[in-house]
Image (cartoon, rainbow, N blue to C red):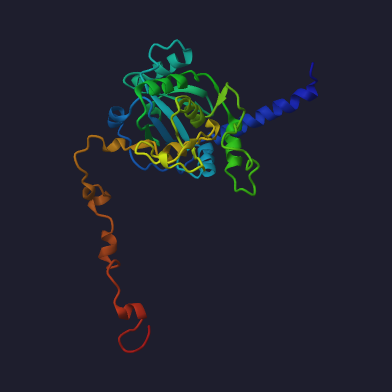
């Protein structure tokens, strides 16, 4: 049996961890929306298997964005109504919470607080998001990807994976992992712990679909074919090294601008506050005209510089 002295440090560390975790998941006050998400067009546009990138509001989100040099701190996969009829109690509660019509528009995500769980797409209605769609993937493979992700429901979040990613992305002279290969596993490397992007990446890799792999150093002219957007043979990167921005940067994921769906033209001159147009206040002060030679030299016209 462990002594009280042995147990106390573990309890203290657990308390510190919970306190720090609570602090890092506190929303920041300076969050800036870049557009208002039109949920009607989003529901009409999004498809099963699409990736939803999120610019999170919490302190931990800001840290992840800094570590990965990206706008995006989180990723989830859209599964639509694939969870209806599930016997998983957590999924049932998520569907009850979502209600209609939102329960037909569900995500599966790995969250640092709840682990892998189902959530309605409307959860991110007031966040900056981006939709990334895998290009050219077969229907059968896409269904396998979605099914694989769903099997992760209930797993824990791998906080060590986030820490290892942060260390790996440090400058080379500070990077303790600089000798690790792209096939190295980061984090706990357990079947019971995942992170948001790694979980999704693993599902796509199971069907051989690339996200942001490494290019082979061996030149091969036959790889520059019309059906290979990479123009090279590829080397699969370990899924634990994939971060949310990689779906945005990937040559094989399309960016879907959901707010433009079904829009009949774009009257960009009428959208500005107070009915004005950008640059009018500057033009009113004649700041946009070309300077005269005298103004460029500082000559006041009398042979003297001002």
Q: Position of residue 275 (x, y in %)?
A: 23, 51
Q: Quadrant of the C terminus?
A: bottom left
Q: Residue at x 64, y 49 (%)?
A: 173
Q: Position of residue 243 (x, y in %)?
A: 50, 36
In the rendered structure, the answer to whether residue 84 lies left or right of residue 275 reads right
Q: Quadrant of the N terminus?
A: top right
Name the residue nearer the viewer: 73 or 145: 145
Q: Is residue 189 above or below residue 175?
A: above
**Residue 198 in view here:** yes
Q: Residue at x 42, y 35 (%)?
A: 53
Q: Position of residue 182 (x, y in %)?
A: 56, 37
**Residue 55 in view here:** no
Name the residue nearer the viewer: 269 or 148: 148
Q: Position of residue 216 (x, y in %)?
A: 50, 40
Instruction: Point out the residue furthest to the bottom here.
Output: 303
In the rendered structure, the answer to whether residue 160 lies left or right of residue 137 reads right
Instruction: Point out the residue furthest to the left here.
Output: 264
Name the residue nearer the viewer: 126 or 132: 132
Q: Quadrant of residue 301?
A: bottom left
Q: Is residue 62 above or below residue 49?
A: below
Q: How many marks?
A: 0
Q: Quadrant of residue 230?
A: top left
């Amino acid at each position: 049996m462990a002594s009280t002295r042995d147990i106390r440090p573990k309890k203290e560390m657990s308390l510190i961890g919970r306190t720090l975790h609570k602090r890092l998941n506190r929303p920041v006050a300076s969050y800036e929306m870049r557009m208002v998400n039109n949920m009607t067009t989003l529901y009409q546009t999004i498809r099963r298997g699409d990736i939803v990138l999120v610019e999170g509001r919490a302190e931990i989100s800001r840290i992840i964005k800094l570590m990965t040099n990206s706008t995006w701190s989180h990723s989830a996969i859209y599964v639509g109504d694939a969870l209806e009829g599930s016997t998983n109690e957590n999924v049932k509660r998520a569907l009850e919470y979502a209600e209609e019509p939102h329960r037909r528009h569900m995500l599966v995500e790995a969250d640092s607080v709840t682990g892998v769980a189902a959530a309605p797409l409307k959860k991110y209605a007031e966040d900056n998001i981006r939709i990334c769609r895998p290009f050219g993937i077969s229907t059968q493979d896409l269904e396998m990807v979605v099914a694989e992700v769903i099997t992760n429901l209930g797993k824990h979040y791998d906080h060590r994976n986030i820490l290892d990613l942060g260390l790996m992305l440090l400058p080379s002279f500070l990077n303790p992992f600089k000798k690790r290969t792209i096939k190295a596993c980061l984090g706990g490397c357990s079947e019971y712990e995942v992170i948001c992007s790694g979980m999704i990446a693993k599902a796509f890799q199971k069907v051989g679909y690339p996200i942001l792999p490494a290019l082979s150093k061996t030149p091969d002219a036959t790889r520059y074919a019309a059906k290979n957007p990479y123009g090279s043979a590829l080397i699969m990167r370990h899924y634990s090294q994939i971060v949310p921005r990689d779906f945005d940067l990937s040559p094989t994921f399309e960016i879907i601008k959901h707010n433009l769906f079904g829009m009949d033209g774009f009257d960009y001159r009428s959208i500005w506050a107070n009915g004005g147009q950008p640059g009018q206040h500057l033009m009113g002060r004649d700041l946009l005209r070309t300077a005269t030679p005298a103004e460029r030299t500082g000559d006041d016209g009398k042979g003297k510089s001002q």
